[in-house]
Image (tube, rainbow, N blue to C red):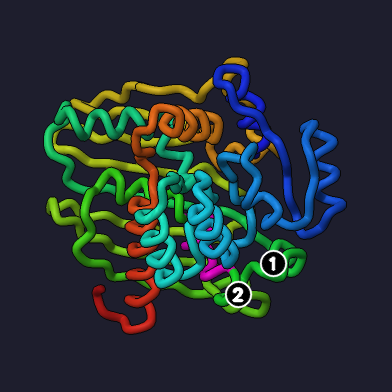
């Protein structure tokens, strides 16, 4: 996903994919052949290379924070896949490292760059529909036992850091937080309803989220469905309601429904790999913006602070589930 996006971005910006690294050298060589770059099996070999200025981390969750910190201390920009760490403590340590580094840390929440998300954010900022009253997000996806057994780091607290909350639904939680603002309390539950014999983490979660603005959010996510349905979002304002369905944004007001946004088309918005359109298709937009900010020296908006806030929300749901009180 990242390599394809980089190839698209380099048509418009002077960047170049120099190397891919994997602990399995055969996988690195396969990628290097496909993308015409070097292959390696030790990321530390990149730390002192002056021709490497930025690194993308697409590793298992528990490796994100430590590897990112090493590159940041070496003065290299880092764009890490979500989550920024597998635990809140590791995320806090990484955030401190990023704040002390001359380089930038970016966290990959590409769904903020989807057209419906941008339009929703603009409507909130402009007050076009009045005050936001409440919002909800629903994620119903499918992960079978083989998804976890084929990659043993998944489904474990020590390496994945959680289940559907921290891996799949983290994007939707990030959007709810981005739209709703500062979170003041959370009441939630996280359980293994379908895959309890395979994983030690949750496959299903729900939460009620109270924001400082008075907005209330409702959230539900599961990996126990039998298909990967598009994420559903609903935002109720004083003067209308926005719905996001299948990458389309609709406005319902005065008894009429109007479509505000359609799925992206055209050569600059390639179809997501392996047909997983429910991922969203905005990696290219995020990566292009990341390098735009690096080149200008301005702060990338999806930085460690933003990544940490979303990690805090996830941890609040886990804590509430364990204690059965609002956090």
State the residue position of label 2. 156
Q: Is residue 40 left or right of residue 122?
A: right
Per the model, the C-alpha gap separating discs 2 and 1 is 9 Å
Query: Where residue 214 is drawn, which disc sits there?
Result: none
Is residue 165 found inside the magenta-colored segment of the image? yes
Quadrant of the image containing the N terminus: top right
Of labels 2 and 1, the one closer to you: 2
Question: Is residue 240 within the magenta segment?
Answer: no
Foreground of the two, 281 or 261? 281
Q: Residues within 10 Å of mark 1 (few under 14, many from 20)?
A: some
Image point 34% across, 64% down: which residue?
312
Q: At numbered mark 2, what does the secondary structure look like: helix, strand or loop?
A: loop
Label 1, secondary structure: give it: helix
Q: Which residue is mark 1?
A: 148
Q: Which residues are magenta?
A: 160-169
Disc 2: CA contacts within 10 A as few (<14), some (14-19) or many (>=20):
some
Residue 15: percent from left, percent from top? 60, 27
Q: Quadrant of the C terminus?
A: bottom left
Question: Contact, CB < 8 Å: mark 2 with mark 1?
Answer: no
User: Mainly helix, strand or loop, the magenta region?
Assistant: loop
Residue 111: image location, x then y, percent = 45, 39
User: What residue is drawn where x is 61% and y is 31%?
Assistant: 5
Q: In this picture, is 290 found above or below 319? A: above
**x, y percentage for residue 109?**
46, 45
Residue 212 occupies quadrant? bottom left
């Amino acid at each position: 996903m990242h390599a394809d996006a980089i190839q698209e971005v380099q048509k418009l910006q002077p960047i170049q994919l120099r190397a891919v690294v994997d602990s399995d050298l055969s996988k690195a060589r396969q990628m290097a052949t496909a993308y015409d770059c070097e292959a390696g099996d030790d990321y530390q070999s990149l730390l002192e290379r002056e021709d490497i200025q930025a690194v993308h981390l697409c590793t298992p969750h528990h490796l994100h924070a430590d590897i990112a910190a090493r590159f940041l201390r070496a003065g290299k920009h880092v764009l890490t896949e979500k989550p920024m760490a597998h635990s809140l403590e590791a995320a806090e340590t990484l955030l401190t490292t990023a704040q002390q580094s001359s380089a930038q840390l970016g966290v990959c929440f590409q769904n903020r760059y989807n057209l419906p998300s941008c339009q929703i954010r603009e409507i909130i900022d402009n007050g076009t529909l009045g005050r936001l009253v409440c919002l909800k997000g629903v994620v119903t996806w499918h992960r079978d036992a083989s998804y976890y057994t084929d990659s043993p780091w998944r489904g474990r607290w020590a390496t994945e850091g959680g289940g559907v909350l921290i891996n799949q639904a983290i994007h939707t939680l990030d959007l709810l937080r981005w739209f709703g603002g500062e979170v003041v309390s959370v009441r939630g539950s996280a359980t293994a309803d379908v895959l309890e014999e395979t994983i030690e983490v949750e496959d299903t979660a729900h939460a009620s989220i109270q924001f400082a603005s008075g907005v209330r959010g409702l959230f539900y996510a599961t990996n126990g469905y039998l298909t990967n349905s598009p994420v559903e979002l609903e935002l109720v304002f004083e003067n209308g309601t926005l719905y996001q369905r299948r990458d389309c944004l609709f406005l319902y007001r005065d008894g009429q429904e109007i479509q505000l946004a359609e799925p992206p088309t055209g050569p600059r918005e390639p179809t997501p790999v392996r047909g997983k359109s429910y991922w969203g298709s905005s990696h290219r937009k995020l990566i292009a913006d990341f390098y735009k900010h690096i080149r200008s020296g301005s702060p990338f908006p999806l930085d460690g602070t933003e990544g940490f806030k979303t990690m805090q929300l996830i941890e609040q749901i886990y804590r509430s589930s364990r204690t059965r009180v609002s956090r």
